[in-house]
Image: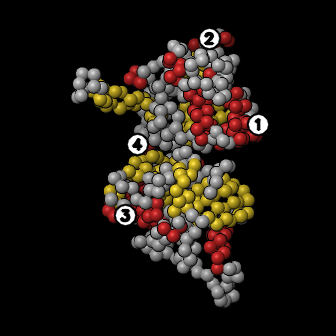
Amino acid sequence: MPVAIAFSFPGGRFHSTPWGHHVNEGAPEWPPSPWRILRALCAVWKRKLGDDPHVNAHLPLALSKMTAPPVFKLPPATLAHTRHFMPWYKKGPGDKTLVFDTFIAVGTVAEIGVCWPDADLTPDETEALVRVLSRLNYLGRAESWCVARLCLNWEALPGDVCGWLDSEAGELSPAELKGTEPTRVLCPDRATWDGWSYGEDAIRPDPLWNLLAETADLHAEGWTDPPGSRWLTYLRPAYSLHMPVAVRRARTAISETRPKVARFALDGPVLPGLKETVYVAELSRRYVQGVFGRLFGGAVSLTFAGKTSEGLPLTDHRHTFFLPTDEDGDGRLDHLTLYTPEGLNAHERATLDEWRRMRGPGGVLLNLVWLGLGQPCDQPVLTGLSRRWRSVTPFVPTRHYKQHGTKRDTCPPGQFPEVVLREEISRRGLPSPTSVKLLDQCALWNHVECKETGRALRWLEFRQQRVFGYGRRGSTPGMGFIIEFTEPVNGPLALGYACHYGLGLFAPMHDGDTP
């Protein structure tokens, strides 16, 4: 079975400079070189999964099968650039130089497909590769935020096919070359990629592969091309970088598949604390409704409001979840995710396209940095197919402990929150949990590095009551849990009181994660 990977760029940009070029030449790499992709996978392995015995045992075998030239599927894209002056100090303190930052502009939910047709991975090798892909945050330069996934249906992935020219088999006919343009792509050399060609002074990686050599050592020894690599000529469609792409306005275009997730990064002089999650979510909802009304003559979005046209609350949790999150583990909210199970229509997408600031708790101005629209599978922090989920905000029961009557609770009061949690899971139609474990505190988690920060909050420190609304809640304080289901569940997963405002939020746990 062939191995295929799909990359998307939530920021709408792919920054990379081909080997042998300067950044000011304005010649970005397209398609991404297989040499770059394999080095990125190795970087994630060594930096984030170096103590994972499964990955250590099986990823090298998987990589060895991915050193053959792959085939690409390229989405519509265009060349773009920014210009800015950087301090140079060559002629004095005020001296500056003009810098061109060229990049590939792609749709925020468009995917680049990479397929190795002859690679046949074992289940263990596939699992090792999936673990690495789930932790790959960028490709190319650090600002090229990416989401990588294993593509199980290569044929269904849209895009123009880009294959390589086998020079040993001879030139292609003019008919086959029509409508294409050649581009040089750096690929691994199957014979030498895992060898070692450097001197004694070079930093020696583990394992001792040319693929893992430091770029500084390569320059120090005067190599023109990285040892273990080779150049291949790929034929990409002639229009692949000339088709105009409205990166900003593409978000508001009507599509057959409505986007369900909108992502923002929060920026401001003082970010709100994680303990104010429900307050920030409520403020976000009010601001979004205000922008919608301003754009569309005072109209109300039922999806954002969570109410019918008669003012009755919507049921079945089909309206928008406003989910602020702390993704670097510093105890302050730095991202905001809007999840709408029914998808966002054109007016709602236009509203989010317009929304760029709000006032947080205490009146502090917060800027919203747009990260993109997509589906739940595009959101790396709150989603992901997993059997185990852990609380990131307290779960607050929606009813009281019943001591009397025919429907009284027979469990001890201390087990009551777990009973309500199981009831909520059942009402949502989720698989029955095999275990529900109580968490004493909320451990702060760095989602970029996939590890705990060593800091923690007590569940009682969180604001557990809405500020602008009431809702049905019990008198029991919120608590945290680890839920293990009988089968994998996809998120976002938010349960209990104020779940549309960030309370009762759970994050997926991967193998090796500890609460």
Going 35% across and 52% down the picture, which residue do you hit? 268
Q: CA distance from mark 2 to mark 3?
A: 66 Å
Q: Label 2, on which residue? A: 171
From the viewer's side, name the closer residue of 342 and 5.
5
Q: Marks 1 and 4: CB-CB under 8 Å? A: no
| 109 vs 438: above or below | above
Amino acid type indicated by mark 2:
Glu
Q: Marks 3 and 1: CB-CB under 8 Å? A: no
Question: Tag 3's secondary structure?
Answer: helix
Q: Label 1, on which residue? A: 122
Q: Is residue 76 left or right of residue 127?
A: left
Q: Label 3, on which residue? A: 361
The residue furthest bottom is 405
Going 33% across and 53% down the picture, which residue do you hit? 269
Of mark 2 and mark 4, the one earlier in the sequence is: 2
Q: CA distance from mark 2 to mark 4?
A: 41 Å
Question: Tag 2's secondary structure?
Answer: loop
Q: What is the crowding at mark 1: few (fewer than 14 residues within 10 Å), some, or many (at least 20)?
A: few
Location of residue 185 by image quarter: top right
| 382 vs 36: above or below | below
Q: CA distance from mark 1 to mark 4?
A: 41 Å
Q: What is the crowding at mark 2: few (fewer than 14 residues within 10 Å), some, or many (at least 20)?
A: few
From the viewer's side, name the closer residue of 349 and 214.
214
| 266 vs 126: above or below | below
Q: Label 4, on which residue? A: 248
